[in-house]
Amino acid sequence: MKRELVFRRAARSEYDAAGNWYEERRAGLGGDFTAAVQNVLDRIAVQPDFYADVWSGVREAIVKGFPYCVYFFDEPGRVVILSVFHSARDPDNWHSRIELFIFALLKKTLARSSASAQSTARTAKIYIRP
């Protein structure tokens, strides 16, 4: 089953900037880069578990022919692209972005859990202070 791919804003920006950079260096090279990344994205959409878990549920896919990796998080029904990252850059750049993503994900999960607990408590006539 092919999953929906959702780019985080920063990941999309990185991807576009890299394609533009390669195109400025040599005509057609930006298209080659875009095609190489698209091949990885197509495979991620079909088989996200194929790629290694490198950090707290985040997976890494290497882009063939270019010094880039795609970092993504597999969610039910969709894959979130967190970074299209040049391998020579400081990994703290994508680590901090991923930490923020995971924090937001946990916050959303806890909010849903809290809402569910509040609903259950109202049904049982118990009050839980938020």
Image (cartoon, helix red, strand yellow):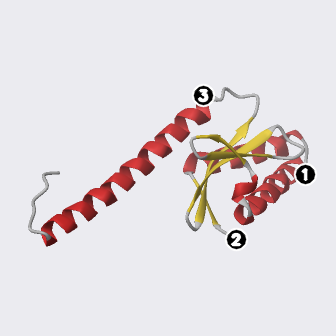
Tell me which label, 1 or 3, sits earlier in the chain. 1
Q: Amino acid at mark 1?
A: Gly
Tell me which label, 3 or 2, sits earlier in the chain. 2
User: How many angstroms separate mark 1 from mark 2 (CA)?
Assistant: 29 Å
Tell me which label, 1 or 2, sits earlier in the chain. 2
Q: Are marks 3 and 2 in contact (CB under 8 Å)?
A: no
The mark lying in front, picked from 1 and 3, is: 3
Task: Give me the disc on residue 28.
Answer: 1
Q: Position of residue 57 (x, y in %)?
A: 59, 46
Q: Position of residue 28 (x, y in %)?
A: 90, 51
Q: Viewer-proximal residue, 84 or 105?
A: 105
Q: Are marks 1 and 2 in contact (CB under 8 Å)?
A: no
Q: Position of residue 82 (x, y in %)?
A: 60, 47
The kind of secondary structure element at disc 1 is loop
The kind of secondary structure element at disc 2 is loop
The residue at the point 10 percent across, 59 percent down is 127
The residue at the point 70 percent across, 73 percent down is 1
Q: Amino acid at mark 3?
A: Asp
Q: Is residue 22 left or right of residue 93?
A: right
The mark lying in front, picked from 1 and 2, is: 2
Alpha-carbon neighbours of circle 2 within 10 Å: few (<14), some, or many (≥20)?
some
Q: Quadrant of residue 47?
A: bottom right
Q: Is residue 32 left or right of residue 115?
A: right
The residue at the point 31 percent across, 58 percent down is 113
User: How many angstroms separate mark 1 from mark 3 (CA)?
Assistant: 31 Å
The kind of secondary structure element at disc 3 is helix
* Residue 60 vertical position relative to residue 43 in the rendered view, above or below: above
Task: Give me the disc on residue 92.
Answer: 3
